Amino acid sequence: MGNGFFCMTKKDIRELGGSKNRSRSNVGRTSQRKMPAEEELLHRRALSMAIQQHQLSQRFEGGASMSRRHGSVSSRRLNPGGDSLANDKQQAVDLENFKTKKFVLVHGEGFGAWCWYKTIASLEEVGLLPIALDLVGSGIDQTDSNKVGTLADYSKPLINYLRDLPEDEKVILVGHSCGGASISYALEHYPTKVSKAIFLCATMVLDGQRPFDVFAEQLGSVEIFLKESQSVVHANGKDKPPTSLMFEKQQMKALYFNQTPTKDVALAAVSMRPIPLGPLMEKLSLSPANYGTARKFFVQTLDDNALSADVQEKLVRENPPEGIFKIKGSDHCPFFSKPQSLHKILLEIAQIP
């Protein structure tokens, strides 16, 4: 089914933290290249540190606003004093208002289940049931990203998860960035298993459109970008189409993390994987009978360098969702830069009748 990600316990964090402290005396004693096992340990330590920081309730600045595509239009500022997940810990959530309590969180290109750790923690705190999946070649899935050729291959953990759900059970899908293509693919194949689909600054494409086309205004012509970019990998030879893409650290920071806390940028630096290009270059086949019947919502991020506010406006104009929500001051990764604003929006969408 793929790898599911859940929050670590405090005991796990203490043990990893203790291991980190014991290793400080060894810093600088070796310059040897890290082996895969050591890299995985570094990943886990970085994640434990990030979770620990979250539990210490580090505060972020920001707010969010919402507007509905249908019916009356309204807007409001959410928590103008900050964006700390700790701010709403005392607010009770009436679970009777949630017809669907299970959220399936689908990461974007290069990311993994790990990127949702703040979202998972905040949803679990109010009694909801989040699960994050590693798509194929992502997170801790061991598949070589260069060998992931189709959207069907890439999205298999999500499709298998929905396939195995009981007939009477539905979930809320949340897709980030190019994860929008995966949840669109899922809506086409299992529309009756999905209560609502939330596109988080995501590739909400039209029938016959490639996910990569959405980024054309940021990167220029797709074909020219792939030909001239130094970040693409040609695993099958230079005379064959490129197989994956991996941005340099500074490129990633500029595109994805321009408002993200430093600790989360560090987590991403040791956790990001090469992006399989095959799924992003594939034209989606979406029908009115399946994809067209889904309840879709779009969350716009207004300080986004990877998918600009103008591009996101174009997406919702060409493919109107049921509702549109906006997060002010968020980069392309609101689960890092504006976790509380994202949390509130997820709760609000889930409670819409």
Image (cartoon, grey):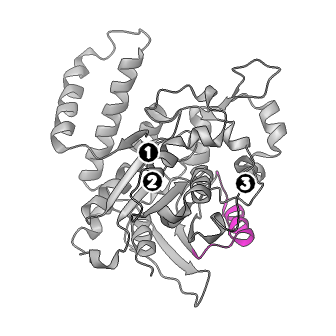
Is residue 161 in the magenta section? no
Horizontal arrangement in the rendering, residue 5 relative to residue 331 (left or right): left
Query: The disc labelled 2 sits on which kind of residue?
Result: Leu
Circle 3 sits on which residue? 285
Residue at mark 2 to residue at mark 3: CA–CA distance: 22 Å
Query: The disc labelled 3 sits on which kind of residue?
Result: Ser
Please identify, in this view, whether the residue under mark 3 or under mark 1 is nearer the observer. Answer: 3
Could you say where residue 31 lies in the image, as x and y percent from the top left?
41, 10
Local crowd size for mark 3, using a 10 Å CA cut-off: few (<14), some (14–19), many (≥20): some
* Quadrant placement of the C terminus: bottom left
Q: For the point 61% across and 35% down, which residue is it?
A: 275
Q: Which quadrant of the figure has residue 312?
A: bottom right
Q: For the point 52% across and 77% down, which residue is it?
A: 66
Q: Which quadrant of the figure has residue 249?
A: top right
Circle 2 sits on which residue? 105
Q: Secondary structure at mark 2?
A: strand
Q: For the point 72% across and 54% down, which residue is it?
A: 285
Nearest to N terminus: mark 3 or mark 1? 1
Looking at the image, which is closer to me, 1 or 326?
A: 1
Name the residue at the bottom extreme: 72
Answer whether labels 2 and 1 touch (C-beta < 8 Å): yes
Which numbered marker is on residue 133?
1
Nearest to N terminus: mark 2 or mark 1? 2
Could you say where residue 284 lies in the image, as x and y percent from the top left?
71, 52
Question: Eyeballing the image, is 333 above or below 32?
Answer: below
Residue range in magenta is: 306-323
* Quadrant placement of the N terminus: top left
Query: The disc labelled 1 sits on which kind of residue?
Result: Leu
Which numbered marker is on residue 87?
none
Q: Secondary structure at mark 1?
A: strand
